[in-house]
Image (cartoon, helix red, strand yellow):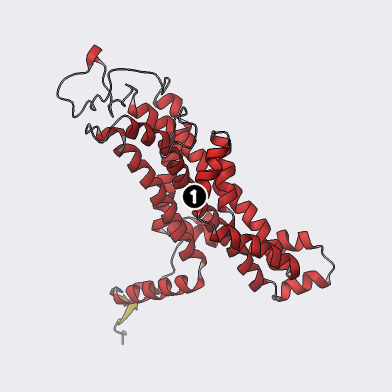
Amino acid sequence: MQATPEKTLVSKSSEPTKIARPWLARWPLLRAFVRNRKAMLGVSILFFFILVALLAPWIAPGNPKKMESRAHLAPAWVADKPAPGGKTFLLGTTGQGQDVFRQLIWGARLSLSVGLSVGIASTIVGTIIGLTAGYLGGWVDDLLSLLTNVMLIIPGMPLLVILAAFLKPGPVTVVMVLTLTGWAWPARVMRSQVLSLRAKDFIAASVVSGERTPRILFSEVLPNMSSVFVGSMVGSTVYAIGADVGLAFLGLTDVGTTSWGTMLYWAQNNAGILTGAWWTFVPVGICIALCAFALTMLNYALDEITNPRLRAEKETTHGKRNRANVLVTPVVRK
């Protein structure tokens, strides 16, 4: 007698999942970074601005300081009448007759280079001080912690104003001043992480095996704080871009250079707000806000990826959502 076919229910969730990118399977953190929407959004915006800054000579050729037409000429797409000489300006002109679009593209070079330089430099200085204070302890920790606390107590903006007013204006001076005033917070974070790692077994094993202190710090301790290091660098970069724009807006940097901060400075001095020339300050404000937004998204994404508590909560929520949306497909099996 022929057996009747048996119907069973097989869930789609029981099928083996295939990884769309096999090369990402070897790097779990990179795979989590690529799958994080906040990280991809932040990287895309930041990469766009970096690419624009690198390609400035081809995107907006010419001297950004050159006077092109009359002052406060409206953008071509909102102007009531054509510009004198038949020239068209995508974002209008400044109070000195300069092309706003060209200045915006060229200003990204200086603003982003200062921000990234300060972010890297202040994080490196803070990491070295935090590692030394947290690992050595004793009077070294007391001295470095006192110095860190003093730098954290002093108000940042007044100190920036005083230092920038007495030093020679220029991008190098801005980087030095912002690094001097921005290393304390990364140092405090790194010190707290080292204090928690110092009691681990692998650190004790390194000490017993006779490894030197610098090797233990940079080969054993620092790799376990890579996420904290990157997060501190991203936060320091956001601080540096905002502080650089603030110093330039106050006229405490070299206002003869072309940056996003000097664009706001000249927009204020040339009465851009009083005359209704919104194109002299709105586009640069949007660019600054987008860069800060991109770096903030990167910081949030890194926290979600590397923080075990946030990662567990996200996986739990994702698992509940998947179980609620499981579709059961009837399959006839003999």
Against 316, residue 168 (above or below) is above
Q: Is residue 278 visible?
A: yes
Amino acid type, label 1: Pro
Numbered marks: total: 1
- Residue at x 55%, y 52% (from the top left corner): 182
Q: Position of residue 143 (x, y in %)?
A: 70, 64
Q: Position of residue 181 (x, y in %)?
A: 56, 51
Q: For mark 1, give the secondary structure.
A: helix
- Residue at x 31%, y 80% (from the top left corner): 9
Along the line of sight, the residue nearer the viewer: 124 or 58: 124
Along the line of sight, the residue nearer the viewer: 45 or 33: 45
Q: Position of residue 33 (x, y in %)?
A: 48, 58
**Residue 154 lies in quadrant:** bottom right
Q: Which residue is mark 1?
A: 158
Against 110, residue 314 (above or below) is below
Within-10-Å neighbours for mark 1: few <14, some 14–19, many 20+? few
**Residue 151 lies in quadrant:** bottom right
- Residue at x 28%, y 32% (from the top left corner): 271
Q: Is residue 15 left or right of residue 22?
A: left
